[in-house]
Amino acid sequence: MLQPAAMRFNDSNSVVIVTERDVMVVDAQADSSTVESLYEKILELTDLPISWLINTHWHADHSQSNATWKRLVGDQLRIVGHESLRTDIPTRTQALLDEQIERLSGVLPRAEANLAEGKGLAGQDLDASQRETQKLAIEQGKAQLEELRRVELLVPDVTYRSVLRLERDSGDVVLLHMPGHTAGDTVVWLPEQRVLITGDLLDEVPFGGHGTPSAIQRSLDHLSGYFPAIVVPGHGPIQRDRERLDLVRELWSKLLRHCRDQQQLGRSLDQTRDALDLGDLRARMTGGEPVAERNFDGFLPDNLERACADMADTLE
């Protein structure tokens, strides 16, 4: 399941793997309505049991709906992920969930009060059409808040440390610990079909997440040696060659090298940022598409800061 193009950097892709005896789902999604829709599509596709739900990491769009999958599928479903998720989901995923609830709980009353006076969130006057749009946004926000308050976070039933191989006659499904985007990233490799499912370790436009760029680069360098025929990133369209993988590796390599060189010259982070020249890499990565450009520009400052912090630790 690929996200709509306009939303592809907000919510993750999910992958359905149908073997000769069961179904595996990679990444849980964040909201229950998306899960229910995907579940119905699986039932249309096959009557084989859904046996495994794989969390590629602890971020909400990859793990928050574990309980919804359990409710729909039943106790036969086993959730699997890296062993670090046993700690990260109750702490880090929960913290992000609490932040969302707190933010919406504060914004919605202000939005309603402003709307009653015909004004937007920033205090600007609204015309009739804009008032209707804000009213709808408030209603959607309230529904989202209620859903978030009902979320029950579940940790994996099964964890692994470095490699977990799920053997199937139709082709093994191999889970590999490849840290970088977070400390507990899982990638899924189907060697018979040469399909690589990366989670957010590889996205259409890279985001450092809660990891370290040098680890991302090491993991992607390692995975490039698998020579996958198909790559399914955490966010963005399916890739049927190595071009995107190599492009993302090039970006991280340039950011790390730039930070190292600037630090050796004694430059500050602001000076390092001002001196950054990616050449045509932004254009090659975004293709001039507005959503991709906006996210590339939004992610770049944090990506550079993480790369420089990474290199500072290396130089010390």
Image (tube, rainbow, N blue to C red):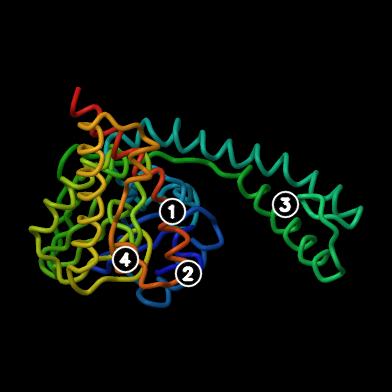
Residue 259: give x, y in percent of width and height. 26, 39
Q: Which mark is residue 290?
A: 2
Circle 4 or circle 1, nearest the eye: 4
The label nearer to you, 3 versus 2, is 2
- Element type where label 4 sits in the image: helix
On the image, numbered disc 1 is attached to which residue? 74
Q: Nearer the viewer, mark 3 or mark 1?
A: 3
Sequence order check: which comes first, mark 1 or mark 2? Answer: 1
Mark 3 = which residue? 142
Which comes before the other along the chain, label 3 or label 2?
3
Q: Amino acid at mark 3?
A: Lys
From this viewpoint, is residue 170 visible? no
Q: Residue at x 35, y 75 (%)?
A: 46
Q: Secondary structure at mark 2?
A: helix
**Residue drawn 14% across and 60% down?**
172
Q: CA distance from mark 3 to mark 4?
A: 36 Å
Quadrant assignment for the N terminus: bottom left
Residue type at the position of mark 4? Met
Q: Are marks 3 and 2 in contact (CB under 8 Å)?
A: no
Foreground of the two, 94 or 37 = 94
For label 4, the residue is 285
How far, Cα to Cα, is label 1 from label 2? 42 Å
User: Which of the 4 image quarters holds residue 49?
Assistant: bottom left
Q: Amino acid at mark 1?
A: Gly
